Image (cartoon, rainbow, N blue to C red):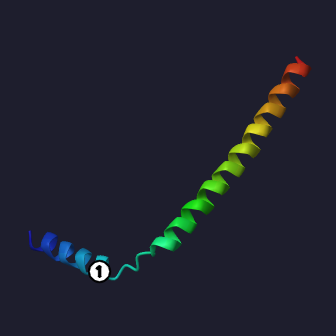
Amino acid sequence: MNKILTFLSEVRAEVYKISWPGRDELIGTIIVVCIVTLVFAAILGGMDAGFSLLLKKMF
């Protein structure tokens, strides 16, 4: 039981050391993630459509 309490107190001490992002940084990061996700979705969707069209023409 003592080890568990020691572990939890160490976890609490480490959580206080975390540098949380500010609101502006967080919003900027979310926008970048959304844009990158949409770009990759468009690329993968285009590849899927292209391969589907290719396979339909082959068979």
Q: Quadrant of residue 41?
A: top right
Dot 1, crowdedness within 10 Å: few (<14), some or many (≥20)? few
Q: Answer left or right for 9 relative to 42.
A: left
Rendered view: 4 above or below 45 = below
The picture places residue 24, in percent across and down from the top left corner, at: 51, 72
Residue occupying the far top of the picture? 59
Residue occupying the far right of the picture? 57
Rendered view: 41 above or below 17 = above
Q: Answer left or right for 39 relative to 20.
A: right
Residue occupying the far front of the picture? 24
Rendered view: 33 above or below 16 = above
Task: Residue at 19% x, 72% y: name it.
Answer: 8
Q: Answer left or right for 27 relative to 15.
A: right
Task: Residue at 13% x, 73% y: name it.
Answer: 5
Task: Residue at 52% x, 73% y: name it.
Answer: 25
The picture places residue 34, in percent across and down from the top left corner, at: 60, 55
In the image, 47 versus 36, the foreground residue is 36
**Numbered disc 1: secondary structure:** helix
In the rendered image, which residue does mark 1 sit on? Answer: 16
Give amino acid for label 1: Tyr
The picture places residue 13, in percent across and down from the top left corner, at: 25, 81
Rendered view: 36 above or below 20 = above
Quadrant in the picture for the C terminus:
top right
Quadrant in the picture for the N terminus:
bottom left
Q: How many marks?
A: 1
In the image, 57 versus 28, the foreground residue is 28
Task: Residue at 40% x, 80% y: name it.
Answer: 19
The picture places residue 58, in percent across and down from the top left corner, at: 91, 21
